[in-house]
């Protein structure tokens, strides 16, 4: 019995260590998601309307007074979101979307936690957290304004590409990088064709966003799996868009005239591909192989 216990002890210690790493990573990811997601509110509120962000970022839209939680509460995640939803203490104006900061923080925290579990403590995780944060902001803006702002999309692409390039160089694997670039460009080209055929059904902002989604999804795939990863993202986007679109059209009663933002579905498809793209692609392609 003693040799068995001695042999199993290192394995048990390793299992506990791995579990602690996972738990710590998830906790840190949730906190980061809450903090950074909450900070998206000024971007979502101001970017569609202004040429540059108004200072202070958490200023009242009516009088400009800062509405940021002060003191120790300013360091607590969600405290700012809960404060901003109340009427401005200076002018009494209530924000147009009082619960949006909390929604942005919550969605970001859930996505960050899922990415942390999927990718582990690697530079890739930082890159995909940046991608997810940009996609959350773009989705929120598109839901309200029906636009995909380049002032959020291009910085998201730049940061994500820089981090994934650094990861490729450090790992000595440049193949995923060039495949991601090719797939991203091809994705935009395909969506451009759809836009030219049906411009009212597919906006040019979605054409740009498709390049970002294709790039981010394809980087995780090896060889031809890079294409299948992007395919999973776009398949998920169109399936989710069709299902939810039918529900919205039926509920609104406006039928095919209903304008439905597509960026949230592209963003959702990208996250689905990053988290479960490999098994979905394997099951999908296995039906034809």
Image: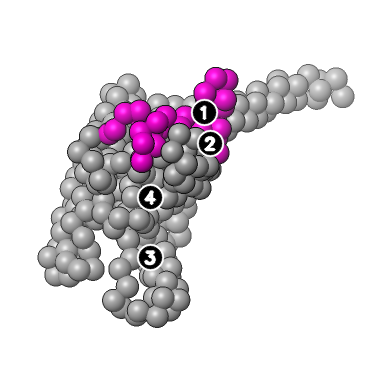
Mark 1–mark 3 distance (CA, rounded to whole Å): 37 Å
Q: Which residues are magenta?
A: 53-82
Residue lying at 55% horizontally and 39% vertically, measured from the top left: 82
Residue lying at 25% horizontally and 45% vertically, measured from the top left: 49
Q: Nearer the viewer, residue 236 or 148?
A: 148
The residue that label 1 is drawn on is 69
Q: Do labels 1 and 2 touch, CB within 8 Å? A: yes
Residue lying at 47% horizontally and 38% vertically, measured from the top left: 88
Mark 1–mark 2 distance (CA, rounded to whole Å): 6 Å
Give the answer, above or below, for where 196 lies relative to 138.
below
The mark lying in front, picked from 2 and 4, is 2
Task: For residue 274, say whether it is visible.
Answer: no
Is 73 part of what is drawn in magenta?
yes
The mark lying in front, picked from 1 and 4, is 1
Callout 3: 10 Å neighbours few (<14), some, many (20+)? Answer: many
User: Secondary structure beneath disc 1?
Assistant: loop
Badge number at residue 140: 4
Is 173 part of what is drawn in magenta?
no
Left or right for 281, reference 150: right
Residue 193 at what x, y percent from top left? 14, 63
Callout 2: 10 Å neighbours few (<14), some, many (20+)? Answer: some
The residue that label 3 is drawn on is 241
Mark 1–mark 4 distance (CA, rounded to whole Å): 23 Å
Q: Earlier in the sequence, mark 2 or mark 4?
A: 2
In the picture, the quarter occupied by the N terminus is: top right
User: Secondary structure beneath disc 3?
Assistant: helix
Q: Nearer the viewer, residue 280 or 159?
A: 159
Q: Earlier in the sequence, mark 4 or mark 3?
A: 4
Q: Earlier in the sequence, mark 1 or mark 3?
A: 1
Q: Earlier in the sequence, mark 1 or mark 2?
A: 1
The residue that label 2 is drawn on is 83
The mark lying in front, picked from 3 and 2, is 2
């Amino acid at each position: 019995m003693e040799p068995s216990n001695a042999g199993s002890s290192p394995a048990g210690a390793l299992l506990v260590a791995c579990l602690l790493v996972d738990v710590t990573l998830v906790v840190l990811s949730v906190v980061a998601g809450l903090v950074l997601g909450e900070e998206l509110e000024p971007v979502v509120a101001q970017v569609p309307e202004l040429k540059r962000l108004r200072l202070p970022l958490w200023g009242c839209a009516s009088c400009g007074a800062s509405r940021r939680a002060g003191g120790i509460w300013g360091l607590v995640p969600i405290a700012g979101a809960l404060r901003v939803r109340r009427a401005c203490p200076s002018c009494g104006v209530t924000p147009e979307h009082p619960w949006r900061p909390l929604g942005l923080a919550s969605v970001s925290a859930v996505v960050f936690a899922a990415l942390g579990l999927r990718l582990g403590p690697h530079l890739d995780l930082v890159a995909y957290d940046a991608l997810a944060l940009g996609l959350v902001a773009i989705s929120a803006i598109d839901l309200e304004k029906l636009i995909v702002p380049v002032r959020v999309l291009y910085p998201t692409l730049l940061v994500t590409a820089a981090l994934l390039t650094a990861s490729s160089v450090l790992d000595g694997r440049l193949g995923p990088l060039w495949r991601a670039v090719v797939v991203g460009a091809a994705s935009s080209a395909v969506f451009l064709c759809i836009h030219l055929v049906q411009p009212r059904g597919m906006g040019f902002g979605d054409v740009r966003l498709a390049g970002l989604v294709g790039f981010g999804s394809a980087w995780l795939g090896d060889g031809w799996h890079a294409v299948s990863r992007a395919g999973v993202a776009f398949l998920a986007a169109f399936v989710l868009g069709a299902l939810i679109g039918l529900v919205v059209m039926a509920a609104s009663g406006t039928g095919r005239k209903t304008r439905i933002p597509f960026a949230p579905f592209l963003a959702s498809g990208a996250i689905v591909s990053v988290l479960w793209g490999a098994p979905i692609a394997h099951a999908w392609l296995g039906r034809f192989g």
